[in-house]
Image: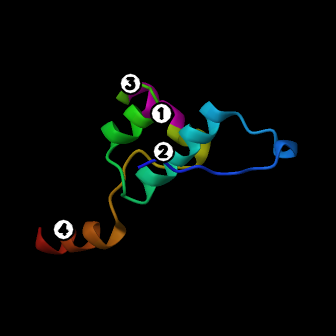
């Protein structure tokens, strides 16, 4: 699926930075795996993992509710 966004030129967005941002946020939301997000960004998994902090996204994408449940079972 292709998505076309019409953004005013006055915003001056760089296409590569925008794709990285969207990839990071889709990874954070659990919509993409690390590999899928890296591929969408045209980066290796390692390089993509390194840029996640630039977008305030944690590499460890594990919900607190899952951690609590796992801890209770230990």
Q: Nearer the viewer, mark 4 or mark 2?
A: 2
For label 4, the residue is 70
Give the residue at the far left of this rendering: 74
Q: Callout 3: helix, strand or loop?
A: loop
Mark 4 or mark 1, whichever is nearer to me: 1
Q: Secondary structure at mark 4?
A: helix
In contact (CB < 8 Å): disc 4 and disc 3: no
Give the spatial CA distance, label 2 vs label 1. 6 Å
Question: Which of marks 3 and 4 precedes in the sequence?
Answer: 3
Q: Where residue 7 appears, x then y in whole percent?
A: 74, 50
Q: CA distance from mark 1 to mark 3?
A: 9 Å
**Where residue 73 appears, x then y in whole percent?**
11, 72
Label 2, residues with CA under 10 Å away: few <14, some 14-19, many ≥20: many
The residue tagged 2 is 23
Q: Earlier in the sequence, mark 4 or mark 1?
A: 1
- Label 1 environment density (alpha carbons within 10 Å; few <14, some 14–19, many ≥20): many
Residue segment shown in magenta: 46-51
Q: Are marks 3 and 2 in contact (CB under 8 Å)?
A: no
Q: Nearer the viewer, residue 52 or 68?
A: 52
Q: Which mark is residue 41?
A: 1
Dividing the picture into quadrants, the one containing residue 36 is top left
Q: Of the residues under marks 3 and 2, which one precedes in the sequence?
A: 2
Determine whether the residue tagged by mark 2 lies in a helix, strand or loop.
helix
Residue tagged 3: 44
Identified at 20% across, 68% down, the residue is 71
Residue 67 in the image, given as x and y percentages of width and height: 27, 66
Gap between marks 3 and 2, in whole Å?
13 Å
């Amino acid at each position: 699926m292709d998505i076309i966004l019409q953004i005013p030129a006055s915003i001056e967005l760089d296409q590569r930075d925008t794709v990285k941002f969207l990839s990071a946020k889709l990874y954070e939301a659990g919509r993409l795996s690390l590999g899928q997000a890296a591929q969408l960004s045209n980066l290796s998994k390692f390089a993509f993992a390194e840029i996640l902090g630039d977008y305030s996204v944690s590499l460890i994408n594990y919900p607190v509710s899952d951690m609590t449940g796992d801890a209770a079972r230990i």
